[in-house]
Image (cartoon, rainbow, N blue to C red):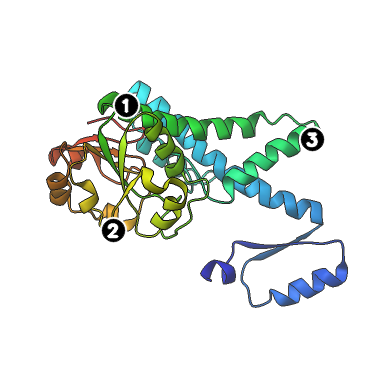
Amino acid sequence: VNDTFNPDRVVIGSDSKRAINVLIELHKPVKGERIVTNIESSELIKYASNAILATKISFANLFAEFAEKTGADVESILTAVGLDKRIGRSFLYPGIGFGGSCLPKDVTALIHISQELGIDPALFKSVTKINTDSRNRFVSNIESEIKSGSTICLWGLSFKPDTDDIRQAPSVYIIKSLLSKGYKLNVYDPASQENIKKIFDKQLNYFNDQYTALEGCDALCILTEWNQFEEADFDKIKKGLKNNIIFDGRNIYDPKKMKELGFNYYSVGRKYL
């Protein structure tokens, strides 16, 4: 509701003056600059906006890989880059990629539209590839530390916090990959477990408590940055896990603190401890 009445802009696309006037009047109570244009431009505005956001996420993940292979710290890099007012920090966060109902769909649509119009879709294809690569790297890191057949706990299943939406969620891709490699999975999410169950049914072990889900697991993986995970009780995590190993796909913890607490902590684009 807040976003509806406080948008950054209101885009009105129409070839009808009457329709434009009606929409302008309708949106009078709504804040934000008005952009009045034709139908074609308004459609491309949405695609362009989501493509830029997806590109920023993939850019962050590409530099996370640079950081991992050079010993750099991706958080320092992106914080400094984001302080440039021409760029900004919004969406410059590395992790296991973007999901949801908008970004993946619109980037894929732009690939098809580009091909139909004879435009090179290389940029959009790269954004999609990097998004997939970020998830594959995360799974590879798990494979390098945890043997097949082990039980792993997954915290977070929705594509972002505060929703039960799992459309194109990174968790779905990662779960399929881990299952195919022989891992057993305990899962917990405060909102989206019923939706995940519709896909995986009895292939997963479902829990109603995040700490109970840890019991007997060889590692914990964080796939969604819910507030309750950021505020987790680390003593309870240690008590539940067989090994103090955490793979953090959202970089919600401080590596130095995790080392002090005795965890083997693997995040994205930051030094493994």
- Residue 233 image offset from top left, x and y in percent: 18, 53
Q: Are marks 3 and 1 in contact (CB under 8 Å)?
A: no
Q: Nearer the viewer, mark 3 or mark 1?
A: 1
Residue ID for mark 1:
143
Mark 3 to mark 1: distance in Å?
A: 40 Å
User: Residue 170 lies in what quarter of the image?
Assistant: top left
Q: Nearer the viewer, mark 3 or mark 2?
A: 2
Residue 247, compared with residue 5, is above or below; it is above
If you read the primary sequence from the N terminus, does the residue marked by circle 2 or circle 1 appear first? 1
| Quadrant that contains the C terminus | top left
Residue ID for mark 2:
208
The kind of residue tagged 1 is: Glu
Q: Residues within 10 Å of mark 3 (few under 14, many from 20)?
A: few
Tell whether 144 sits left or right of 26.
left
Residue 141 in view of the camera: yes
Q: Is 136 or 94 nearer to us in this picture?
A: 136
If you read the primary sequence from the N terminus, does the residue marked by circle 3 or circle 1 appear first? 3
Residue 174, compared with residue 32, is above or below; it is above
- Residue 141 image offset from top left, x and y in percent: 33, 28
Mark 3 to mark 2: distance in Å?
A: 47 Å
